[in-house]
Every structure is written in structure tokens, then in C-alpha cells.
Image (spheres, rainbow, N blue to C red):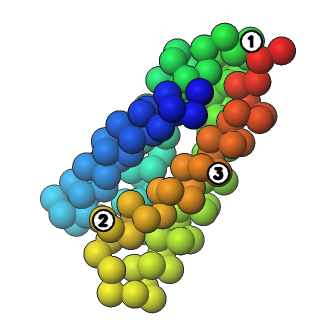
């Protein structure tokens, strides 16, 4: 299960990172709000694949599962936003590199929350 999650997480993360770049570099959005928006878009994509491939066999309904997933994503969003802000404000690190570093912590936290609370198999 962790292996499938890693594949889906990496794919969704690349999409989110590309969206972050577009929001900041092409549309001129500030980095922290752009990170939040791209995170939520990538998280929704992750749910679609998570539902069908990572946690197949879940007995929770699709809509209910999405609500729980997004509640868990709220935790990831808070972790991501705070750590991202700290890295770009307190260090000279590039915002894309900061987002990559932050993803390790937030991604693992979201996987654990979803595995334990959302997609459990009865």
C-alpha cells in the first residue's frame, strides 16, 4: 500500500509543483497562497487515484471518503503552508525546492491519517 501511495503521491506532487510554478511565474500569484491552491488541486487528484488504486476495497462511500480525505488534507495544508512559509521567509532557499522539502513531511502525515482514519478496511 505504501508503494502505491508513493507512486500516486509523486505523480500528484509533480502536477501540483507544475501548477505552483504556473501560478507564481505566469500568473503572478504570491508564493504562499499559490502553494495552498496547488496543494489542494494535487490533493484532489491524489484522492481520485487513492480511492481506486491505493486503498481499493475501502467500504466508505465516495462522497464521505472525499470529505474525510479533505479534512485530513486540511492537516497537510496547515503543515505545508507553515513549513513552506518558514523556509522561504527564513532561508534563501528557492520556493520550488522549499515546496519539495516540505512535501516529505506533509505527505507522510496525510498518508498515515488516511490509512488510519479514512480508507480502513473493515
Looking at the rendered structure, the secondary structure element under dot 2 is helix
Above or below residue 106? Residue 8 is: above
Quadrant position of the N terminus in the picture: top right
From the viewer's perspective, is 36 left or right of 117?
A: left
Residue 59 circle label:
1
How many circles with numbers are drawn on the protein?
Answer: 3
C-alpha gap between disc 2 and disc 1:
37 Å
Classify mark 2: residues with Cα within 10 Å, few (<14), some (14-19) or many (20+): some
Classify mark 3: residues with Cα within 10 Å, few (<14), some (14-19) or many (20+): some
> Is residue 48 in view?
no
From the viewer's perspective, is 29 left or right of 32?
A: left
Quadrant position of the C terminus in the picture: top right
Above or below residue 88? Residue 108 is: above
Q: Position of residue 10 (x, y in %)?
A: 39, 41
Using the rendered view, name the quadrant where residue 90 is placed.
Answer: bottom left
Mark 3 or 1 closer to N-term?
1
Mark 2 or 3 closer to N-term?
2
From the viewer's perspective, is 36 left or right of 22?
A: right
What residue is rendered at 56% in x and 71% in y? 82
What residue is rendered at 38% in x and 70% in y? 98
Above or below residue 29? Residue 77 is: above
What residue is rendered at 25% in x and 49% in y? 18
The residue pinned by badge 3 equals 109
Mark 2 or 1 closer to N-term?
1
User: Which of pointers 3 and 1 indicates the residue nearer the eye?
Assistant: 3
Q: Position of residue 81 (x, y in %)?
A: 52, 65
The residue pinned by badge 2 equals 96
From the viewer's perspective, is 5 left or right of 63?
A: left
Classify mark 1: residues with Cα within 10 Å, few (<14), some (14-19) or many (20+): few
Q: Position of residue 85 (x, y in %)?
A: 48, 75
What residue is rendered at 54% in x and 49% in y? 107
Above or below residue 45? Residue 71 is: below
Amino acid at each position: 500500500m505504501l508503494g502505491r501511495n508513493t507512486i500516486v503521491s509523486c505523480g500528484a506532487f509533480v502536477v501540483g509543483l507544475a501548477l505552483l510554478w504556473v501560478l507564481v511565474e505566469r500568473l503572478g500569484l504570491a508564493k504562499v497562497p499559490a502553494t495552498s491552491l496547488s496543494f489542494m488541486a494535487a490533493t484532489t487528484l491524489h484522492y481520485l487515484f487513492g480511492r481506486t488504486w491505493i486503498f481499493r476495497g475501502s467500504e466508505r462511500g465516495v462522497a464521505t471518503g472525499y470529505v474525510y480525505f479533505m479534512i485530513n488534507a486540511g492537516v497537510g495544508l496547515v503543515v505545508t503552508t507553515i513549513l513552506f512559509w518558514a523556509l522561504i521567509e527564513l532561508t534563501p532557499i528557492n520556493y520550488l525546492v522549499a515546496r519539495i522539502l516540505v512535501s516529505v513531511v506533509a505527505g507522510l502525515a496525510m498518508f498515515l491519517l488516511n490509512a488510519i482514519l479514512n480508507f480502513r478496511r473493515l
